[in-house]
Image (tube, grey):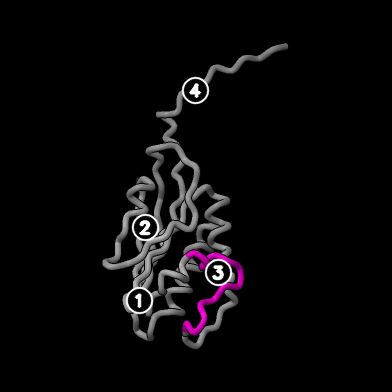
Amino acid sequence: DEIVQVVQNLVDNALKYSSAGGKIEVTIERGRTLDETFQTRMADSTRLSLVTPDREQGARYVVVTVRDHGPGMAREYLPRLTERFYRIEGQKSGERQGTGLGLAIVRHIVIRHRGALSVESALGTGALFAAAFPLAPDRKSVATQPTEEIF
């Protein structure tokens, strides 16, 4: 339910900040590493990691990306995006007003799931949010430890 809430919040923001009839892209990729997840995907954009997990090297993730083609955000606003009640001054969000809690909720859910969250943005071309959630280890690759019972 929480991962669905992450996707809903990211799509809701994309809808708010895109013009009517604007294009929004949602992708889901399985089996990516954090290095692959945090590669810049938009030309001439600024990318910032908002949540970086403590994970072992080579861990694999499911990555949900939501990209809009709205006005984008200037670099100086990106570090504060996940603060509660933070809204970029002067940024229009269409007819739908928000509380400034959506990305703070996303951040907390991503942290709770030991995931990662990043944003890319370029003024005039939009924004891309990527939320990564760790895959469960493959049962075949997990060595079973013998258990010892003491009576």
The answer to the question of whether label 2 and label 1 lie on touching residues, with beta carbons closer than 8 A, is: no
Which label was assigned to residue 44? none
Q: Which residue is mark 2?
A: 28
* Labels 2 & 4 near each other (Cβ < 8 A): no
Give the camera-side residue of 27 and 79.
79
Q: Nearer the viewer, mark 3 or mark 4?
A: 3
Q: Where residue 146 appears, x then y in whole percent?
A: 54, 17
Instruction: Give SS at disc 2.
Output: strand
Q: Is residue 30 left or right of residue 4?
A: left
Q: Earlier in the sequence, mark 3 or mark 2?
A: 2
Please report the bounds of the magenta region as a residue range.
Answer: 79-91
Q: Which residue corresponds to the image point at 43% horizontal and 79% vertical from the top-left?
A: 17
Q: Amino acid at mark 3?
A: Gly
Quarter occupied by residue 19:
bottom left
Q: Earlier in the sequence, mark 1 or mark 4?
A: 1
Residue 124 vertical position relative to residue 46 in the rendered view, above or below: below
Circle number at residue 144: 4
Residue beneath label 3, please? 102
How far, Cα to Cα, is label 2 from label 4? Answer: 31 Å
Closer to us: 126 or 141: 126
Q: Judge whether 148 appears above or below 24 on screen.
A: above
Disc marking residue 123: 1
Discs 3/1, front: 1
Is 39 part of what is drawn in magenta?
no
Pair 1/4: label in front = 1
Identify which amino acid the numbered label 4 is placed on: Thr
Whether residues under marks 1 and 4 lie with C-beta atoms below 8 angstroms apart, the answer is no
Furthest residue toward left:
43
Please provide percent x and percent y for residue 67.
Answer: 36, 68
